[in-house]
Amino acid sequence: MSGEIVIKRALISVFKKDGVLELGRALANAGVEIISTGGTAKLLEGEGIAVTPVSKITEFPEMMDGRVKTLHPRIHGGLLMRRDVDSHRKAAAANGITPIDLVVVNLYPFGEVIAKPDCKDEDAIEMIDIGGPSMVRSAAKNHDFVAVVTDPVDYASLIANAEKGQVTSTPAERRQWAAKAFQTTAAYDAAIASWMLRDAEELPQRLQFVFDQRQSLRYGENPHQRAALYTSDEPVQASVAWAHQHSGKALSFNNYLDAAAALEAVRGLEGFGCTVIKHKNPCGAASRDDSQVEAYQAAYAGDPQSAFGGIVAFNQPLTPEVARLMAVKEKFYEVVVAPRYEGDALEILQTGAKWGKNVRLLECDDLKPAFADRELELRWIRGGMLVQDPDLIGAVDFKVVSERQPDEAEMDDLRFAWELVRNVTSNAIVYAKDRTLVAAGAGQMSRVDSVELAGRKGGDRCQGAVMASDAFFPFPDGILAAKKAGIRAVVQPGGSIRDGKIIEACDAAGIAMVFTGRRHFRH
């Protein structure tokens, strides 16, 4: 690799103009010849910065609405020629090609355009940059002799260098910038490919995901594990990864996992919903038609002991009335997540309790229904990755299979429990009453163990409650345990070879049973 180079000639062509005036002025003052295109050239010229139009170099006008301007041998030859190869130098001299030492390019904002709800196909296609990535790749390939800058963050280094009177670039610097350039074009192509396959019926044969480090974390699940948060290029609304943090310490790895689980659990609740999460499982949840206060109080009452130090999420803007109930010394939360904070709710949570200055308050924007979110779910395993569609509730056909029909209140509770059970670790059992989580049995190796665990946890509050099971009951023992706990109605997928025996057990116990035909394992 060649050593330090002196930058004498630069090509600047950027869509986002932030910082480019300062850069152009610094380069020009250091004696660098600037080549530019379109809007970038006009901006620089308007500020009195000398610019050589690309069309003067290529002796071709910009044409086809700007689609063709830099795709020319006098541009790419100037980027790709090796200065240490005699044949390259002779070819350049014979064809009027002058070396280009620096390329400053950022690409058309394809991701931003496709994120708009009213984006048409033709709008997206026009935002597929061709000339920009081509110049970036040419310069990055030849980084022995050419510096390429795709990130405005790196302008400062060039400006500081230019202020010394001569712009130079070290081999290490050029290699780092070249790597970033290839990361940029890889991410760009991945975004385009994903968009083009967005309506495909089958999962793609090749998956391309590019994530940028958004936040370095103190450690992972345990202090000896390194960790960081990575996000996609464009913000995802109503997500913890892109939420605005109003106060409190930086979120930890486990905070992110629990807060994301809390948000997903509350997303599907009707009316005013509230969930309390501990170790990714709901320990409290409730929904109410008319009162966020009642929803929060019911969710907290489900398991006050586990709620201490937990994560609380709301599906509606958090009101000052609820904030006052939360901001008392007997209660402590690690994270609060809400679409917005109304009135002085933020101030109350930040100052109204001893823990206020430490609690992480996240604002995540209005929640979309769970079934509107089509992001693929990824699970890393050693040497590979498992990919699946998200487990979305959608429309459910509740089929009563027992002699006893559930009454209207029980059916409301069964729907609530069925929504909630998919957010509990399998084998999952949820007891609910009055659209409130009574208790959950999570992560047990035996389904009947989960039923009994929920019964012990709920105690007397289980009397008259309903039960949801994320998968079918293989034996009647789960029904017998539910009867002992006081359960009056059950919702489950059905599908066991012993369904008949399970239904008989329900009929004998006077329990109403509903089949959904859909399983909700969550490993």
Image (cartoon, helix red, strand yellow):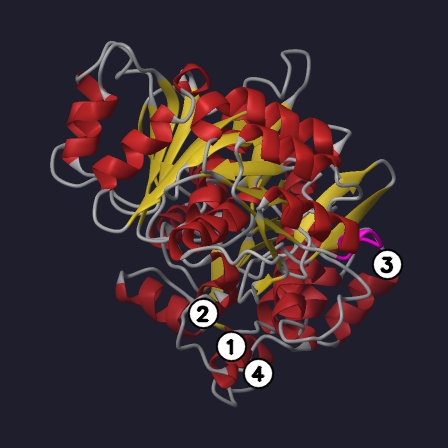
Magenta stretch, residue numbers? 495-499
In the image, 476 versus 99, the foreground residue is: 476
In the image, 380 versus 232, the foreground residue is: 380
Magenta portion: prevailing SS class: loop
316 left or right, relative to 468: left
Residue 44 picture location, percent across and down: 34, 62
Could you tell me which secondary element the residue under label 1 belongs to? Answer: helix
The label nearer to you, 2 versus 3, is 2
The correct choice, above or below, for 56 with respect to 114 in the image is below
* Mark toward the start of the polypeptide (1 vs 2): 2
The label nearer to you, 3 versus 4, is 4
Could you tell me which secondary element the residue under label 3 belongs to? Answer: helix
277 left or right, relative to 93: left
- Callout 1–callout 2 Cβ contact below 8 Å: yes
The label nearer to you, 4 versus 1, is 1
Q: What residue would you read off at disc 2?
A: 113
What amino acid does circle 1 point to? Ala
What amino acid does circle 3 point to? Asp
The correct choice, above or below, for 207 with respect to 304 in the image is below
Identified at 62% across, 57% down, the residue is 402
Q: What residue would you read off at disc 3?
A: 86
Give the number of callouts: 4
The answer to if 230 sits in the magenta stretch is no
Marks 4/1: CA distance? 18 Å
Marks 1/3: CA distance? 43 Å
Could you tell me which secondary element the residue under label 2 belongs to? Answer: helix
